[in-house]
Amino acid sequence: MIIEQEAGIMGWKGIRVYLTMKEYVTSGSRLDTWKSQMAKRVGEQAASMIKVLAMFEVTEVRPLVDFGQGWERSI
């Protein structure tokens, strides 16, 4: 879920994102490369906590609360 909170509950915006995992990597050069790139952004200690690189496909996007408005009008 991706939610943008407002002062009142009726002002909240959001979408539900449905994903399917396509692939995951627990070792090897792809994971090492990704971790080294992340270390530049978040630091070595945070990057060292990453144990799995997972790739997903977005299969569906829907409104947080579906009144038939379509997800585009929910953001």
Image: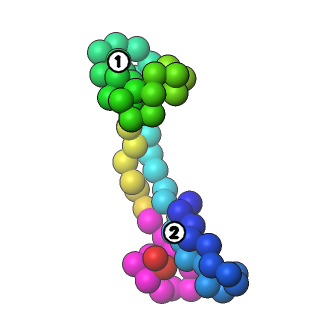
The single residue placed furthest to the right in the displayed view is: 8
Query: Relative to the observer, which residue lies in front, 9 or 56?
Result: 9
Across and down, in percent, residue 59 comes to: 40, 56
How far apart marks 1 and 2 lie (CA) works out to: 32 Å
Q: Residues within 10 Å of mark 1 (few under 14, many from 20)?
A: some
- 65 versus 2 height, above or below: below
Quadrant showing the N terminus: bottom right
Q: Residues within 10 Å of mark 2 (few under 14, many from 20)?
A: many
Q: Quadrant of residue 23?
A: top left
Element marked by disc 2: strand
The numbered mark, 1 or 2, whose residue comes first in the sequence reads 2
- Circle 2 residue: 15
Q: Would residue 2 be visible to someone looking at this image?
A: yes
Q: Residue at x 37, y 48 (%)?
A: 57
Q: Residue at x 52, y 27 (%)?
A: 46
The stretch in magenta equals: 61-73
- Amino acid at pointer 2: Ile
- Position of 40 with respect to 16 (left or right) is left
Across and down, in percent, residue 38 comes to: 38, 31
Q: Would residue 65 be visible to someone looking at this image?
A: no
Residue 9 among those drawn in magenta: no
Element marked by disc 1: helix
Q: Count the marks.
A: 2
Q: Quadrant of residue 28?
A: top left
Across and down, in percent, residue 32 comes to: 35, 18
- 15 versus 1 height, above or below: below
Query: Relative to the observer, which residue lies in front, 53 or 41?
Result: 41
Q: Residue at x 29, y 15 (%)?
A: 29
Which mark identifies residue 32?
Answer: 1
- Amino acid at pointer 1: Asp
- Position of 34 with respect to 60 (left or right) is left
Q: Residue at x 48, y 60 (%)?
A: 17
